[in-house]
Image: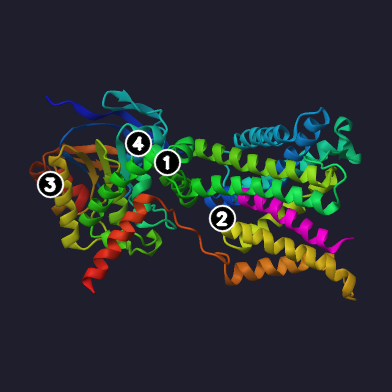
Amino acid sequence: MEEELLKIREVSKHFGGVYAVNGVSLGVRSGSIWGLVGPNGSGKTTLFNTILGLHRPDEGAIYFNGTCISHLAPHQIYALGLVSAFQIPRLFQGLSVLDNMLVAARGHQGDSFLNSLFLRGDWQKQEVEFADRAMEILELLELDRLALSPAGELSGGQRKLLEIGRGLMASPTLLLLDEPAAGVNPKLGRRIFEGIENLRREGLSFFIIEHRLELLFDFAHWVYVMDKGKIVVQGEPQDVVRNPEFYQIYFGE
Amino acid sequence: MDPLVYVLDLIVFIGIFGIMSLSLNLEFGFAGLANFGKVAFFLVGAYSYALLSEIGVSFYLCLIAGALVSATVGFLVSLPTLRLREDHLAIVVLTFGEILRLVVKSERWIGGVWGMAVSPAISVAGASARVGVLVNIGLVYLCLVICFLVVQLLANSPYGRVIRAIREDEIAAEALGKDRAKYRAQIFALGSAIAGLAGGLYAQYIQFIDPYMFMPMITFTVWIMVILDGPANNWGALLGAALVMLFDRGTNIAKDYLALAVDPSNLQYILFGVLIILILLYRPQGLLRESKVKTKAIDRVGHGRRATKNKGS
């Protein structure tokens, strides 16, 4: 059996008396695309934020690559290669599109205070490579023409794409995407998923929340269905689609 | 008084406040930290200089030590205020500055209300007032150039990009692997070190310090300098310092020539208020634009795009 990249054991998170995530256990294996679906308010985003360290889980443990990450700060989790793109893009609006990408580069030597002052030669060389990769990703997302414009000038869909691009820029091991195809046109939505599939072949793993089921189910290898803070159904997409419980939760009677 | 000395004196003040303005620009302009306790670090630098020079330490060591002590205080202040957002941070550091001033005022061993005499950094035996001020211009502007280079190099580096990113969205920066507590503490320490250096230069130039010279108005004056000419632009910070200092001195001179119902030096505060309101209403980004992050890699991308554009047309 393949090794589980991300392992979540009995994780709960409540806000006051409301259990947003209630005893969730699941696993994500490397080299595949994993889906997470469920009605609005079922706790998907809370689960993602808990994985990323933005919320501390009240109970349970989260392992990434065998390391327990439930008590690490978000920047430490990022350093391990577990990276996300927010559902509502949180761009650095005053910075250019390219700068937004470069902030996300993992292991940039110039990010440290002393290096940026005294080792200018070293990080400048490194940054040229980062910039080349950033431009490749921007090209894929059709944002390369806007590389030097402020991120605040992008349209809603473009912001979404840049948010995903920033996640890719980190060369993560596992990328969590929260509704990558929401708010972009259907053709581009499919292109995003095709891009994701290409990156998967290169060894990246994905864990994706998406309401556009026709897209997600075409590409995902395994789908978890969440309702009221719990995982209620899981399986391969073609099985989940035929599951009556899934139908009732998602589409109603 | 010799009018030339008056002009030279103005130049020294522009230099000292230029350093202050650069320091606040680093903290607020680039990193978004609303440091309303600027004067506290100015005070720490000035008193450190005074105390050390009293026991006979040479002036450059006094200046460096003043900056280091101030940096330490800045670092310590950053720790409890780590989680505070803009306005809360502003209130806490503002009160910190005022409390520190009151403590200094009531401590006898550092002069209390009577203040301390400070020996000048470089004194030329038998020289005229002009030469004395000229020497100070040299010293102050040497320090200004060093500070400018440091802040400018930082602003145009990945580090500068990260602190701007933290200014724009702390949570997103944290989720993209940036330890915001670390960056915040570093910026506080460096900004305070620069302000401390300015304080040391100020103390040795005036040759006397007392707690009344470190009123919160100093902080607000530096803020006007930064807001006036556009945060996150180092040239703007210097231009702002020059304009505000000219205005400050101008109203003092005007006092002798204009017969107004209001004392011009009080009128100056009113005018500053009006000026800030006008700037915030009509040009909130300041007179100059925010400077972009400039590194070799970004220049390359810029050139590449221009080249393809030219081909296309």
* Residue A116 makes an appearance in the image: yes
User: Residue A36 appears at what percent x and percent y?
Assistant: 23, 43
* Rendered view: B32 above or below B62: below
Q: Residues within 10 Å of mark 3 (few under 14, many from 20)?
A: some
Q: Residues within 10 Å of mark 1 (few under 14, many from 20)?
A: some
Of the two numbered discs 1 and 4 on the same chain, state the one appearing first in sequence: 4
Residue type, mark 2 in image: Asn
Q: Position of residue B101 (x, y in %)?
A: 79, 41
Task: Report the chain holding disc 1.
Answer: A
Q: Mark 4 = which residue?
A: A107
Depth-wise, is mark 4 or mark 3 nearer the camera? 4
Which is closer to the viewer, label 2 or label 4? 2
- Residue at mark 4 shares a chain with residue at mark 3: yes
Q: Nearer the viewer, mark 1 or mark 2?
A: 1
Q: CA distance from mark 4 to mark 3?
A: 31 Å
Look at 84% across and 67% down and name the residue there. B253
